[in-house]
Image (cartoon, rainbow, N blue to C red):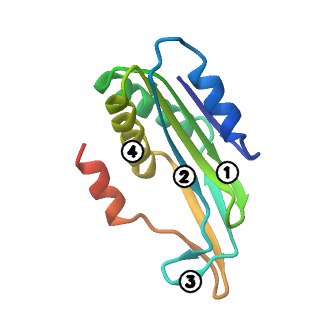
Amino acid sequence: MAVRIQTQDFDTSAEITALRRARADIGAVAVFIGQMRDMNDGSHVASMTLEHYPGMTEKALEGIVTQAKTRWDIVGALVIHRVGELKPLDQIVLVAVTSTHRGAAFAACEFIMDYLKTQAPFWKKETTPQGERWVEAKVSDDEAKARW
């Protein structure tokens, strides 16, 4: 199980390959990749700055992964989340989960992402033609988390 917060981009293929080759009993890999889009709430977004609380963010993510491990029979998990300034099409987050069977991998991957969106201390500031704005929490993210 690994959690990383970083400014630099990540090589999705290399990260997934390393995770799935870690053990021979892995039969499934579920992956979520979040990337920055150029529109949000009806406005063009030129860039986004992601901030976090160092130490606390990693601890929160590790706790989420630990919860997933107790709920499902997963073999491994990897969460990489970028911070700093991002542009449209930049990768933001990678969540990858391995298990012996697909059901556990799919469920744990979705759980980790749903909890990450609501429980991890990240703050997003977008740059739009109207100026900078902080991104508010979404009700839909809270609803996704509540189903677990």
Q: x, y (%) of residue 55?
A: 60, 35
For label 4, the SS is: helix
* Mark 2 or 1, nearer chain start: 1
- How many residues crowd mark 2 within 10 Å: few (<14), some (14–19), many (20+)? some
Distance between mark 2 and mark 3 Cα atoms: 21 Å
Q: Mark 2 against mark 4, which lies toward the viewer?
A: 4
Label 4 crowding class (10 Å Cα cut-off): few <14, some 14-19, many 20+? many
Q: Please, what is the three-letter code of the amino acid marked with disc 2?
A: Phe
Q: Earlier in the sequence, mark 2 or mark 3?
A: 3
Which residue sits furthest front? Answer: 27
Label 1, on which residue?
83
Label 2, label 4: how many angstroms apart (C-alpha)? 12 Å
- The C terminus: image quadrant: top left
Seen from this angle, which residue lies furthest top?
24
Measured Cα–Cα span from mark 1 to mark 4? 18 Å
The crowding category of the residue bearing disc 3, from other C-alpha atoms within 10 Å (few below 14, some 14 to 19, many at least 20), is few
